[in-house]
Amino acid sequence: MIYCILLNPAIDVIYTIEDLELGTTRTDVEAEVIPAGKGINVAKAARELGEKVCVAALMPEDDRVRFERYLGGLGIECRFFPVEGSTRISSTIIDTKKGPQVTHMSSAGRKLSRRLQDEFLGFLSCHMHKGDIWAIAGSIPRGFDPEIYKKIIAMCRAKDIATLLDTRAKALKMGVRALPTMIKPNLSELEGFFGEQIQGVRHIALKGKYLMDMGVAYVFVSLGADGMIAIHENECLLCSAPEVETVDTVGCGDALDAGLCAGYSRKFSFQEMCRLAVASGTSNALHRGAGVVKREEVWRLMEDVRVEAV
């Protein structure tokens, strides 16, 4: 089972409009309303790849049923820890006449207490089983300790559960100290971790090797359309994505996470694990929506992922 952790769920409201003018009122605008969050994006892609998946989440009571129905319709299990209130809103406005031009606005969630954090950690511990994989991704709610991911990873290690960490800033720095099985920063997040500009493939590889020397088994640095750098044991690989006509890049990193978890779960070789991950991210780029991949498309794209030693 792949568990996808979701601490900061959102409701995505996506408006598609032609020629937006500020200060005006528009009615009957085409819109989509979708339960969202990085944990859900990873879960959707992993489920489409054929994995058994569960989302473990802090879930505001007002929107619990909406999320349960959405995930259930996708064949994804859910384990929700209820909190008071409603889910934060993330709005996207797509102006089809200007590019298209995309504008994002995301509201802040309500501040939660440390007592609630401790109760949530106890809730998670009840769902930890040896041999599972936990994907720990996304932002942390206001009020929670930045070390919460570190604590979750340490709990998983004690129960022989593999972990993937995908976050940024202090949560990444703290989380790495607990030695997750895999980490997947992008270049900007890697630079934030080390506090310096990182230039070139070999410089990225050097920093990745440092993280591996700390005790992280797998280091994956995503490079967007250029693929990723992958480091494990004595191998350092540059994995280049196939060239495609991009539709939407939102969620490509989450789909890549799903590919890593699926490859690890199936005990793929390191190179094949990388191919699956990059192909999953590329498939996401071919579709509108985060975490949207097509299984057969991923298998085809794997053949076009170029892997070379660095």
Image (cartoon, rainbow, N blue to C red):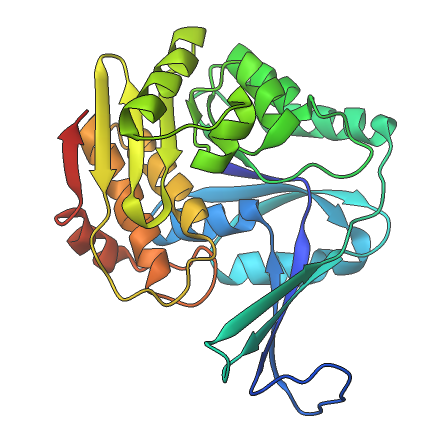
> Could you say where residue 273 lies in the image, as x and y percent from the top left?
25, 34
Q: Is residue 165 visible?
A: no
Residue at 66% in and 42% down: 57
Is 35 situated left or right of 49 in this image?
A: right
Q: Is residue 118 visible?
A: yes
Is 295 situated left or right of 95 in this image?
A: left
Residue at 36% in and 21% down: 218
Q: Quadrant of the N terminus?
A: top left
Residue at 21% in and 18% down: 235
**Above-or-below relation of 246 to 4:** below
Is 68 situated left or right of 292 in this image?
A: right
**Above-or-below relation of 179 to 273:** above
Residue at 56% in and 34% down: 167
Q: Quadrant of the C terminus?
A: top left
> Could you say where residue 30 lies in the image, as x and y percent from the top left?
59, 85
> Could you say where residue 150 lies in the image, as x and y percent from the top left?
62, 19
> Could you say where residue 207 lies in the image, as x and y percent from the top left?
39, 18
Nearer to the camera, 252 or 41: 252
